[in-house]
Image (cartoon, helix red, strand yellow):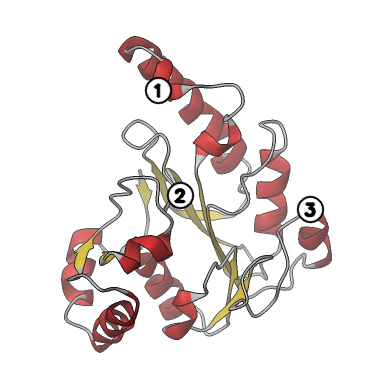
Amino acid sequence: MINQGLPNELLWAKDFMRSSRFDEIIQAVRDISTNSIETYLDMDQGPTPRHQRMRRGDLDLQPFYILDYISRMSRGPIYDIGCGFNFFKNFYNIIGIDPHSLQADIQASYSLEMARVSKGKMDNVFSINAIHFCKSDELKHRVKGFFDMVKPDGYAYLAINVARIFDDVLKFEDLSKDQRSKANEILSNYAKANVLDICEDEVIYWKDTIGSAFDSYVNGNIKILARKRA
């Protein structure tokens, strides 16, 4: 895992949970949830979206780990591609983009056309499990367009769930243990070639959890944070 400049996740989480921002987040989740709240860091257990997790009292801190860093390093807004119910906007300088959400600031879906007209125009971009709904040979173009939207010195965070790309060709639950291990290796190499190697900027953070969370609905199993070179 590449981690250049970000604080240790566990130490960050300990400090973050003592902050006033965390108190505000907990109160916001209480407004959603009827259960007691349990916090965890990038565990991605089960196939439920983020809002449903919060309704049952689960709060995953991993996105805040990234948003805290970008917000500390950049004064510009963060464009959240696929923002869902735009929860993060309550705590950060977010411009939410989503085709289906009434809470989004801009109702639109990510596309190569969006990337083309937005090239070099966004201060920072952030996206979790929103741009990977494509064929396997299309991902590299979508990733390249995503990184290209960022202004020089801006930050780009992208998380994808590799399982969504191979829904039609790989029934992971039917594979033997040995077949799963080989599939994980192949998909990790695919992700490196079509995400990490596509990024021409300064890579700050790269995390591959395909082996432990093949179908990662909430936070994704490939995560990359990069800084656009000036």
Q: CA distance from mark 2 to mark 1?
A: 23 Å
Residue hosting label 1: 173
- Which of the two labelled residues, at mark 3 and mark 1, occupies the earlier sequence position? 3
Taking 170 as reference, is 140 left or right? Answer: right
Secondary structure type for disc 2: strand
Q: Which mark is residue 223?
A: 2
The residue at 30%/54% (across/down) is 42
The residue at 64%/44% (across/down) is 133
Residue hosting label 3: 112
Q: CA distance from mark 2 to mark 3?
A: 20 Å
Secondary structure type for disc 3: helix
Q: Quadrant of the N terminus?
A: top left
- Which of the two labelled residues, at mark 2 and mark 3, occupies the earlier sequence position? 3
Indicate the amino acid at tag 3: Leu
Taking 38 as reference, is 82 left or right? Answer: right
Pick the front one: 20 or 90: 90
Pick the front one: 205 or 209: 209
Q: How many marks?
A: 3
- Closest to the camera, between mark 2 and mark 1, is 1
Residue 178's spot in the image, x, y percent?
34, 10
Tell me the crowding category of disc 2: few under 14, some 14 to 19, or many 20 or more residues within 10 angstroms, Cα based.
Answer: many
- Which of the two labelled residues, at mark 2 and mark 1, occupies the earlier sequence position? 1
Relative height, residue 133 to residue 125 (above, below)? above
Indicate the amino acid at tag 2: Lys
Q: CA distance from mark 3 to mark 1?
A: 32 Å
Q: Quadrant of the C terminus?
A: bottom right
Taking 190 as reference, is 151 left or right? Answer: right
**Residue 6 visible somewhere in the drawing:** no
Relative height, residue 221 to residue 205 (above, below)? above
